[in-house]
Amino acid sequence: MGLKKTFSSVNPAINGRANGKAKRLIRISIVILILAASALAFLFIHSYRSYAKIVDARMAHGYLVSRAGIYAAPRTLRAGQKYSRDALAAILRRAGYVENEDVSEVWNGGFTVRNDSIEIRPNNNGSYPSLVRIKFEPQDRIAEITGDDIVLDAFRLAPESLTNNLSKSSARTQLSFKDIPPMLVHAITSIEDRRFFDHHGVDIVGVARALLRNVGDERIGQGGSTITQQLIKNTYLTPERTLRRKYAEAMLALTLERRLSKEDIFALYCNEVYLGQRDAIAVRGVDQAAHVYFGKELKALTLTEAATIAGMIQSPTRYSPAQQNAAARERRNTVLGTMARDGFITLDEAAATAKEPLSVANFDPARESVAPYFIDYVNRVNSPTVSESLEGAPIITTLDLDLERLALDAIKHQLDRLDRVYQPRGLTPQVALVALDPKTGKVLAMVGGRDYAQSQLNRATDAQRQPGSTFKPFVYAAALESGMSPLQLFKDAPQEFSYAAGRKYRPANYGGGFTMRDLPMRDGLIKSLNVVTVDVAMQTGLARVANTALKFGLPRPTPYPALALGTTEVTPLQLTAAYAVFANGGKKIEPQVIVSEAMSPDDQVIAPTTAFIITDMLQGVIDHGTARAARGSIANTAVAGKTGTSRDGWFVGYTPNLVCAVWIGFDDNQQLGLTGAEAALPVWTEFMKGAIDFRPELGGTSFDQPEGITIAEVDPDTDELATGKCPMHERVALLTEQAPTSECFRHNVYFDSSDLNSHRPVTQGLIRTVTERNLS
């Protein structure tokens, strides 16, 4: 009894202490939870701000042009360029401008089409100009450009995307939400994210389901990603599947939803989503998918086609209608079921559409692809930079999409003509074209073959072929550098040349004929005379000629007489860059395909006077030489160039601001059987005429004449100063110290009546000195 009493008296104390301890534990737990929650909140806020900076940085630099990928050169609009109103509107859509007066900062800007103008509102963070007006002439040319009512010399657009990965792509229009048919919106949201217009970027239920499905696995499988998260994955993140990346995806999605409207997010998603590959073309975006798979505009899609595109998103390869038609039909029917479930279509519509066959349109990858050879070359020569770009910063290339299109058109027209001759024989000619800026080396157009889907060999950069007579200007440049005059005489007659310890070489002119006369050196180049050219090379020194070619960036030929006739193989890109030296005052440039702030230093490989004299000779080639078919084809523009005939056909020519080389031949090195003037010159002429008509600044009325040059008017029969009695006059560029001083006496001397006593011949006007600049 006493013991029981004792325990009774102790119990309240024990209970009190226990209760106090429990209360303390509860308070500590609450504090810990508050601290943990505060820490988590702090970490969340810090994390959110960090990811918000990523999104804000993208917005500040232009969302569409700051994402990873390869881009064409930005178009610079100028008055006089050949753009119609509708053509420029299409370009603006592809470059990320939306046809709307009020657009969000995600787009590169908005534009409005007026009767005779287009008004552009660039998203430039409030800087000048806020409104750019492009006025058009009735002849489909830009008449005037104004920025905030002030006349502008030029206005640069945002660049168009060439590809977002290493695959080829086709031209893509950047869609705004209003451009997407409601039927397609319903199909995509039903199968991919039915609560898209309700959630805030992350579907908590879906994320929880994905986490439970992959618990215990460091790598996350699919499931739970909203459309916003998928957009983030496609544009911000690497493709790995880890918890860390999933967290970044969610945070970026939350951030993006606070900065963009649902409509803009959905439009971006529809522009970026990967939808498989057809032949060599990677399909990105629903608009491109409509063209590639169904051959129609997006707005013309049927219900079955819209459901098919929506169904491809989950697995573009597995559900490709072009390659896995049965699986694509089954997936389409699943999408139709979800659309009926969500009330977008009736059960009867779903059932009827599910019975329809799934037809795919014919596809021409050559028509759809954009500069595939050029993209390959960019990937190859700058592979580390490109790989980094595809995960981070954009790569802006030098490619001019308008010139690329003109090149393809010119090539197609000539190949259509040649195919009528060669296809009955079972032969298929190939082609290469390179065009670049001779002042900067920027490659503006590059075509490496007639059909990329059939052959990925880039003949512009990789096909080593004998250049034939297109090599001759380098022979004559070496001769001029050694001190020879363009008027020095050489015999155009059969000759035998000795070299290498008694070996003999007997060249013949093309066609086998000879004039059997002494001709000035310049005629040897203008008329492409083989014997004269070999003689010039021998007198200059074969080693000197070979070293000159090397300085121009060409492979060094083995020094034997035939080198003068272009027997050492080169690529079209090498030859284009070498000719740029003549157009660039003797300075060598390196071809560039990626825009860089750091320009390679100019390398003066020949004297400016030598470059000008060669250009004068090559103008003669077009005026009255082997390329006279091109004479007058490009109005008000100074042009120079050279034909080349080996087993292939070549033409390389230039204006003061554009140089272009064209090669046509067979891959197996069969004899083409056509001259360069017949095979390659028509392509060059059509391309250059179109390019300069489109962009007049690529032309130029004259080549800059350097100091030390005299333009002498000579009688071509005597190479002496022409007089009024001479039946023919020819203007010739020479070094001032090499200019002729005596007049032509063969056609009688003309005396001025006021100067009969002195018997001094009239020479006024026969020599134009360097003070009268520029050769047209």
Image (tube, rainbow, N blue to C red):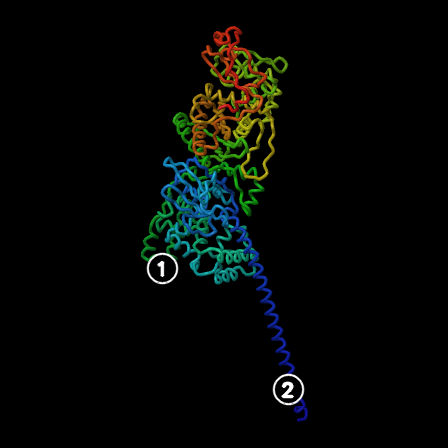
Q: Indicate whether 617 appears above or below 152.
A: above
Res. 149 visible in picture: yes
The image quadrant that residue 570 belongs to is top right
Q: Dividing the image into 4 quarters, which one contains the N terminus?
A: bottom right
Q: Residue 580 in the image: x percent, y percent?
A: 54, 28
Q: Residue 700 in the image: x percent, y percent?
A: 48, 29
Identify residue type, mark 2. Pro
Q: Which mark is residue 444?
A: none
Distance from the alpha carbon under mark 1 to that under mark 2? 68 Å
Mark 1 closeness class: few <14, some 14–19, many ≥20 residues within 10 Å:
few
Q: Is residue 503 left or right of residue 431?
A: right
Q: Residue 317 in the image: x percent, y percent?
A: 45, 47
Instruction: Give the residue at the far bottom of this rendering.
Output: 1
Q: Which residue is mark 2?
A: 12
SS class, disc 2 = helix
Q: Which residue is mark 1?
A: 343
The image quadrant that residue 19 belongs to is bottom right
Mark 2 closeness class: few <14, some 14–19, many ≥20 residues within 10 Å:
few
Nearest the viewer among 595 and 350 is: 595
SS class, disc 1 = loop
Identify residue type, mark 1. Gly
Whichever of callouts 1 and 2 sits on the residue coming sooner in the sequence is 2
Res. 468 visible in picture: no
Q: Indicate whether 39 appears above or below 678.
A: below
Q: Residue at x 42, y 43 (%)?
A: 133
